[in-house]
Image: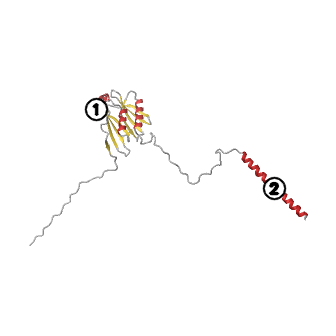
Amino acid sequence: MNKTLTGVLAGAALLTGACGGQAAHEAQGIERLAAQPPSPTGGVPSAPPTGPMVSTPATGSPTAGTPGAAGADDLKRAAQAALAAASGATLVSIESEENGKRWEVQVADRDGTERRLDVADGKVVSGPSLEDDDPEDMAELKNLLSAVKVDWTQALDKITATVPEGRVTELNLDSEHGKPVWEADVILPNGTKQEVAIDAVTGEATNPGSATPAVTGTPTETGTPTTTETPTTTETPTG
């Protein structure tokens, strides 16, 4: 009996020691965790999101350099670059090429001498090169320039005010009934080309509403209508 009691007491002592060791080990682990620095987020890291990732498209208007956005700002920038390269000249013609990627610019001196330049991305890429004009054309242009009171910048402002929803792709100084006039092509959002003319003396729009419908297809061929003949009635002779 005494041996049995002694064995039970010894087993209990061993069990108590083992439990005490495990408790001490767990306490040491808790102390190590408490001593670690906090995470950068200041809290418990969140679980990674589940499900498919959905990207939100960026919003905003396209930049001025986008192909097809050739408008008043691009035209002004190209014209100013050309005039800076041809010191002392004045703008007489500017036209958008390659969907606005390049501008063909013509400038002229007061004596009617014309020069041509190509501008892309606001920089002159070719020219200025002299135009091969005869003396008669030079004299005509000289007289035209001397009569101009409204320059190309003022004309452009008037055009954009007249057709604010369009983009100007061409601006030319021409003569109409012996008077100088600025003629412009303006492309509307629906693709229609509208022609606007600005009096280069008074600054008034003389042709603000002439539009050319967009071409939607090839016209069908119409032939000459055929004539349908009505058969005549045949009388049966009586006898």
Marks 1 and 2: CB-CB under 8 Å? no
Circle 1 residues within 10 Å: few <14, some 14–19, many ≥20: few
In screen coordinates, is 73 left or right of 234?
A: right
Please state the horizontal and vertical placement of residue 57, each as a whole percent of the image: 50, 47
- Disc 2 target residue: 18
**Closer to the camera, 111 or 43?**
43
In screen coordinates, is 87 left or right of 23?
A: left
In which quadrant of the rendered view does residue 113 lie? top left
Where does the N terminus fall, quadrant-wise? bottom right
Q: Residue furthest left?
A: 239
Task: Tell me which amino acid carries mark 1.
Answer: Lys
Checking the image for residue 179, the label placed there is 1
Q: Name which residue lies at 82% across and 56% down.
A: 16
In screen coordinates, is 86 left or right of 137?
A: right
Q: Which type of secondary structure does the marked residue at label 2 adopt?
A: helix
Q: Name which residue lies at 41% across and 36% down.
A: 73
Q: CA distance from mark 1 to mark 2?
A: 113 Å
Where does the C terminus fall, quadrant-wise? bottom left
Task: Tell me which amino acid carries mark 2.
Answer: Ala
Q: Name which residue lies at 81% across and 56% down.
A: 18
* Vertical placement of residue 225 versus 173, above or below: below
Q: How is the image coloured?
A: secondary structure
Please state the horizontal and vertical placement of residue 23, each as a whole percent of the image: 78, 53
